[in-house]
Image (cartoon, grey):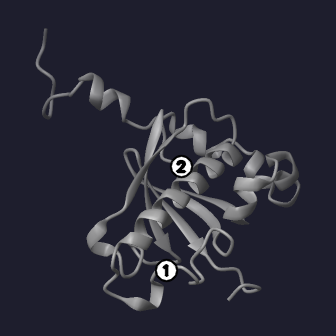
Amino acid sequence: MAPIPQGRIDVSKDRIKHAPRAMVGFVQLGSVGLHDLLNRPLQQLAGRYPALSDQSLLACGLPEIQLKFTFRTSSQWPGYEPYNYIEKVSLAGAKCNGQVATAVAEAVQSLLQRAMRAKPYESTYAILPGSQYTIQNLALVGLRHVQGDIFIAEFEIPRRMA
């Protein structure tokens, strides 16, 4: 067998399992409310948010993604950077962006519960009982594919809430 030019190829199962088929860039979901994702049928939401019916997030071909959380354009959730919250989200069985978005909303619910027990070093974006950062107030703007199996979920508080 001839040597492989320019280095070697890692064909271990772990490497192949987590290598995306394609980079999906930023998938705009339309600022859909997390509360709606958790409580309304996807068919109903897809009428208002057509991107939920699309399959663009599944183009990466990954069985699961690691999800980092940001608020608007920050690289981390402000005030919680030291905690570096990352949630694994399974894509198994997902047939559309809406099912992935629902799994993201469930992961955010878990994040918010953990964050309420942590002490943020910046109170502006503190996740506390009674704060504006709740499932009822947050909307998922979209998911940004960073590299490999890492995605960033971007959120906002719609103007009607702010």
Left or right: 115 in relation to 48? left
Q: Residues within 10 Å of mark 1 (few under 14, many from 20)?
A: some
Left or right: 87 in relation to 138? left
The residue at which mark 2 appears reads as: 24
Q: Amino acid at mark 2?
A: Val
The residue at which mark 1 appears reads as: 128
Residue plotted at (77% across, 45% down): 53
Q: Residues within 10 Å of mark 2 (few under 14, many from 20)?
A: some
Residue plotted at (15% across, 23% down): 4
- Classify residue 91 by image quadrant: top right
User: Residue 114 versus residue 41: which sits nearer the camera?
Assistant: 114
Q: Position of residue 78 (x, y in %)?
A: 40, 80
The relative height of residue 115 versus residue 44 in the rendered view (above or below) is below
Q: Position of residue 37 (x, y in %)?
A: 71, 56
User: Residue 129 versus residue 96: which sits nearer the camera?
Assistant: 129
Q: Position of residue 31 (x, y in %)?
A: 70, 68
Q: Position of residue 40 (x, y in %)?
A: 80, 53
Tell me the quarter of the image containing the C terminus: bottom right
- Classify residue 129 by image quadrant: bottom right
Residue plotted at (67% across, 46% down): 97
Q: CA distance from mark 1 to mark 2?
A: 33 Å
Tell me the quarter of the image containing the N terminus: top left
Q: Amino acid at mark 1?
A: Leu
Residue plotted at (36% across, 88% down): 122
